[in-house]
Image (cartoon, rainbow, N blue to C red):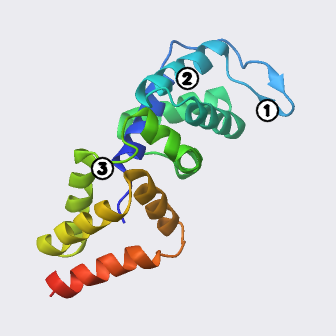
Amino acid sequence: MHRSGLLVAIIGALVLAGCSDPAPPDGEVVGEVALWDAEVRDGFLDACLATAGGAGGYCRCALSGLEQEYTQAEFEAIEGQMLGDSTVPPRFQAIVEDCFETHVGELFTALGQDGAWSEAARTQYLAACVETSGGLTAYCTCAIDGLEARYSQTEFTTISMAIQRGGEVPDAYEAIVQECFAEHGE
């Protein structure tokens, strides 16, 4: 399944959120972890909250995870790399995805997308489905119609991310896809 466009947008927002003037030396130490300077932390949170519709739990989770994994200097180097070539390091992405999964309901509610699917999500699903199915547009349209009727965007995103991590496909989901393939597949 295709990743949610929201996740990609939020990863991008997290990259842009950290942009700031060069920071003073490393911040205070809490336990074994050196926290980033207040200016970098505040800039990160402000930009994340603005992009994520005020989903504070998600933004604090991302900040905490990234601070625990990377020193401020490492984060700034990664940020520069991502701004240069759009490559998101796997560990960085995993931290953000973990927070996304934990706070997906909060994010969709904050962004007003909890129930009905956004047009962007629907379009993104259709494009990915048509590409991966070898051009079976009727099948993909049937699948998205059935999935949209059965699952909220939040539920669908949660299921898709679980599947990507090796989780099982729910029976109702599988039935929708199989029925559409039987009707519209080759």
Residue 76 visible in the shown view: yes
Q: Residue at x 17, y 84 (%)?
A: 183
Say which element carries label 3.
loop
Task: Kindly check if marks 3 and 2 are in contact, taking CB atoms under 8 A apart as contact.
Answer: no
| Image spot of residue 109 (x, y percent) | 45, 38
Mark 3 vs mark 2, CA separation in Å: 27 Å
Query: What amino acid is labelled 1 in the image?
Result: Val
Mark 1 vs mark 3, CA separation in Å: 40 Å
Quadrant position of residue 69: top right
Label 1 Cα neighbours within 10 Å, binned few <14 / some 14-19 / many ≥20: some
Q: Residue at x 38, y 43 (%)?
A: 6
Q: Residue at x 22, y 46 (%)?
A: 119
Query: What amino acid is labelled 3 in the image?
Result: Trp
Query: What amino acid is labelled 2 in the image?
Result: Leu
Mark seen at residue 73: none
Quadrant position of residue 65: top right
Is 36 on the left or on the right of 84, as rendered?
Answer: right
Return the residue nearer the eye: 67 or 109: 109
Q: Residue at x 52, y 36 (%)?
A: 78
Mark seen at residue 117: 3
Is 7 on the left or on the right of 180, as rendered?
Answer: right
Residue identifier under label 1: 33
Compare marks 2 and 1 and give the one earlier in the sequence: 1
Mark seen at residue 45: 2
